[in-house]
Amino acid sequence: MVPKRSAAGEKVTIRRARPKDAQACGKICYGAFSTINAAHGFPCDFPSAEATTEVLAMMFSTPGFYGVVAERGGRIVGSNCLDERATIAGIGPVTVDPAAQNLGVGRKLMDAVMDRAKERGAAGMRLVQAAFHNRSLSLYANLGFDVRESLSCMQGRPQKRSVSGCKVRAAQPADLDACNALARRVHGFDRGADLVQATEQGTAKVVERAGRITGYASHLAFFGHATAETNLDLQALIASAEYFGGPGILVPSRNSALFRWCLGNGLRVTQPMTLMSAGLYNEPSGAWLPSVMF
């Protein structure tokens, strides 16, 4: 990477993240999110610096993720990650120390993971950004990302706990082929590696209707995604959840029927978000929830 010289004469350099970087990066990540969210009147996406440290420690050490950190004057000032487990690469969280703004750190962190994705032949890249954060929206647009979906982050405990004709159960390894085939029909690609890990961790669910799998969720949470044939199947998955992990699930706002069903079923909007993509993008042909990665 070519270093970028700051106005103060110090270079901003990018290197591969190491597991031991997670503590410093976790503090920066929490500080960055809490600062920008508070400035716009929204709660932080993470409950504590310990939570962000745990998330980044996983990303920095798990196969299928590529992490980078930015350093200035020998000190870490930001980080970014790339989810490489599918044909489409997911980006984030990208965070910069509030004390290191206006040095081009965010752009360099984005350039690093975008270069990595291109080198590895990713068909496309996606990310989710806070819709109130004009600065990040402008950065991603300038880097070639297009706005694809307005999302509503929703939280709450569903009042209706089941949907007639739909059976929701824990996903099993034998369900993977059917789930991946469904994802390919809806999105044009599958997220099989993600789903394998979610199944092993016990967070994945499937919905059956008329004796066959018609939807699945890797996790009904901020970092989980769901794919289904119809809104009915997705409603069954959502209704089955005791709670939604993190800030909540991400509901495409223009899916008016699903959005209104969620509102009528006791969920509330906590913040607006935006799905953006660069490269290959197929308009989904079913019902779906993205994760905060994509």
Image (tube, rainbow, N blue to C red):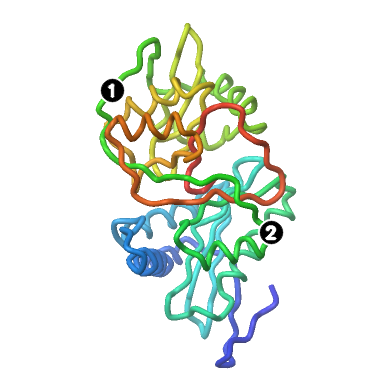
The location of residue 135, given as percent across then percent down, is: 52, 68
Q: Secondary structure at mark 2?
A: loop
Foreground of the two, 254 or 90: 254
Q: Is residue 187 above or below residue 19?
A: above
**Residue 61 image point, x, y percent:** 49, 54
Q: Quadrant of residue 8?
A: bottom right
Residue visible at 61% across and 33% down?
Answer: 284
Q: What amino acid type is highlighted by mark number 1?
A: Arg
| Residue drawn where x is 62% and y is 22% of the image | 181
Q: Is residue 290 above or below residue 67?
A: above
Is 4 or 152 nearer to us in this picture?
A: 152
Can see residue 60? no
Farthest residue to the top: give it: 210
Q: Amino acid at mark 2?
A: Gly
Relative image position of residue 220 (x, y in whole percent): 39, 35
In the image, 169: left or right of 100? left
| Label 1 CA crowd tier, 10 Å (few <14, some 14–19, many 20+) | some
The residue tagged 2 is 144
Tell me which label, 1 or 2, sits earlier in the chain: 2
Picture residue at 33% right of the left edge, 39% below the top: 244
In this view, the residue in front, 76 or 241, is 241
All told, the count of numbered labels is: 2
User: In the drawing, does residue 265 fall left or right of residue 227?
Assistant: left
Q: Position of residue 3 (x, y in %)?
A: 66, 80
Kindly tell me whether residue 188 is visible in this rendering: yes
Q: Residue at x 48, y 43 (%)?
A: 291
Find residue 161 and name its label.
Answer: 1
Q: Residues within 10 Å of mark 2 (few under 14, many from 20)?
A: few
Image quadrant in which the N terminus is located: bottom right
